[in-house]
Image (cartoon, grey):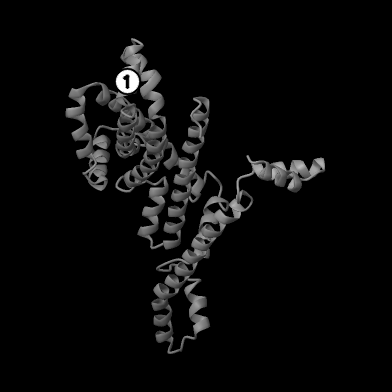
């Protein structure tokens, strides 16, 4: 640093201790970090507001036919204010307005006893239990298959193509067959739904872990060989730590897929419990508000599961010294 610059910094640097500490803190703080939260919040609120405007507009347009039909039967004219009011308050609208869905969601969560068959908490727990069981099965299968594929060329050549081919079959075609076959064997309840969830969740874990376990390059593997490390030591000390970011990314995809699989499995089984059952009963009786409330409950549950996996990821990576 030149003497001229040093002289300029001495003139500009505050002389009091408090001012110096404040200036030093401002230099350590990243540029623009003070308004980071507001900058992130602004786009989110803008997108939410745009979605609400489009949603309300679509609700008016799609629910207007019923209002006009009722007015035609009564021989009356429909004003704009009456059209807006009645399209926002129909008991069985074609497209519920956002406030109707929010009200249905609130009544399903807080307006019922948890043990009630009308409670979304009760149905959410039924779906969640099968989702977690299926996710555990699928993740374990994906991990074991990935380890076998990475260490065995025979498994790589034989298992991987079948795993890829299995995902080309629509889940809507497999789920009824699995449910019917297991029911004929006397297996009902949580296990059939967990198997469907495991079927959807194992593939992301398998692909992510194969990629992660193969992440170390040739120089790192050669270094382990110079240390005379055997295959198990190479796996635990090099391959597994390298695969952690891939593992948690695939687990986030896998647990969301497991929830979808569980809900799909509840549809053909004629289940009376679970979010899939709420969707099914809502479609039977034309309760569109019930359908949308169950959809939002499922989306909230999926978001919570992904956030939980993300929290576990941060803890594990911090313990392993890999946190960013």
Q: x, y percentage for residue 64?
A: 42, 77
Q: Where on the picture, by quarter, is residue 229? A: top left
User: Considering depth in this image, is 249 or 130 the residue closer to the camera?
Assistant: 249
Q: x, y percentage for residue 67?
A: 43, 79
What residue sits 64% from the left and 44% below the top?
29
- Residue 123 shows in this picture: no
Q: Is residue 151 left or right of residue 74?
A: left
User: Considering depth in this image, is 67 or 301 the residue closer to the camera?
Assistant: 301
Q: Is residue 174 left or right of residue 247?
A: left
User: Considering depth in this image, is 308 or 278 the residue closer to the camera?
Assistant: 308
Q: x, y percentage for residue 164?
A: 22, 38
What residue sits 50% from the left and 72% below the top?
88
Q: Is residue 171 left or right of residue 285?
A: left
| Residue lying furthest top | 228
| Residue lying furthest right | 16
Q: x, y percentage for residue 80?
A: 49, 83
85 shown above or below 31 = below
- Residue 189 shows in this picture: yes
Q: Mark 1 points at which residue?
A: 221
Q: Is residue 175 left or right of residue 51?
A: left
218 shown above or below 110 = above
What residue sits 26% from the left and 47% below the top?
172
In what quadrant of the picture does the N terminus appear?
top right
Total marks in image: 1
Q: How crowded is mark 1: few (under 14 residues within 10 Å), some or many (20 or more)?
A: some
| Residue lying furthest front | 3
């Amino acid at each position: 640093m030149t003497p001229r610059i040093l002289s300029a910094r001495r003139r500009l640097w505050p002389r009091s201790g408090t001012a110096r500490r404040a200036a030093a803190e401002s230099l350590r703080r990243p540029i623009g970090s003070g308004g980071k939260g507001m900058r992130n919040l602004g786009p989110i609120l803008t997108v939410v507001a745009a979605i609400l405007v489009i949603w309300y507009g679509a609700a008016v347009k799609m629910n207007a036919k019923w209002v006009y039909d009722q007015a035609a039967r009564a021989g009356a004219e429909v004003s704009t204010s009456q059209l807006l009011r009645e399209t926002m308050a129909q008991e069985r609208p074609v497209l519920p307005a956002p406030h109707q869905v929010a009200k249905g969601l609130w009544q399903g969560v807080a307006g019922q006893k948890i043990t009630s068959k009308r409670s979304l908490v009760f149905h959410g727990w039924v779906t969640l239990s099968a989702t977690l069981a299926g996710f555990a099965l699928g993740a374990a299968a994906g991990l074991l298959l990935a380890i076998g594929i990475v260490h065995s060329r025979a498994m790589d050549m034989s298992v991987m193509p079948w795993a890829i081919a299995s995902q080309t079959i629509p889940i809507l075609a497999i789920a009824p067959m699995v449910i019917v076959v297991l029911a004929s064997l006397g297996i009902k309840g949580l296990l059939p739904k967990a198997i469907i969830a495991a079927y959807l969740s194992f593939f992301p874990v398998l692909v992510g872990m194969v990629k992660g376990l193969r992440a170390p390059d040739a120089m790192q593997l050669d270094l382990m060989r110079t240390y005379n490390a055997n295959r198990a030591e190479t796996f635990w000390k090099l391959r597994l730590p390298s695969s952690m970011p891939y593992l948690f990314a695939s687990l986030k995809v896998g647990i969301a897929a497991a929830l979808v699989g569980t809900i799909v499995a509840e549809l053909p089984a004629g289940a009376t419990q679970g979010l899939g059952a709420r969707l099914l009963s809502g479609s039977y009786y034309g309760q569109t508000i019930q359908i949308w409330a169950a959809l939002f409950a499922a989306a909230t549950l999926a978001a919570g599961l992904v956030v939980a996996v993300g929290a576990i990821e941060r803890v594990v990576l911090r313990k392993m010294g890999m946190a960013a």
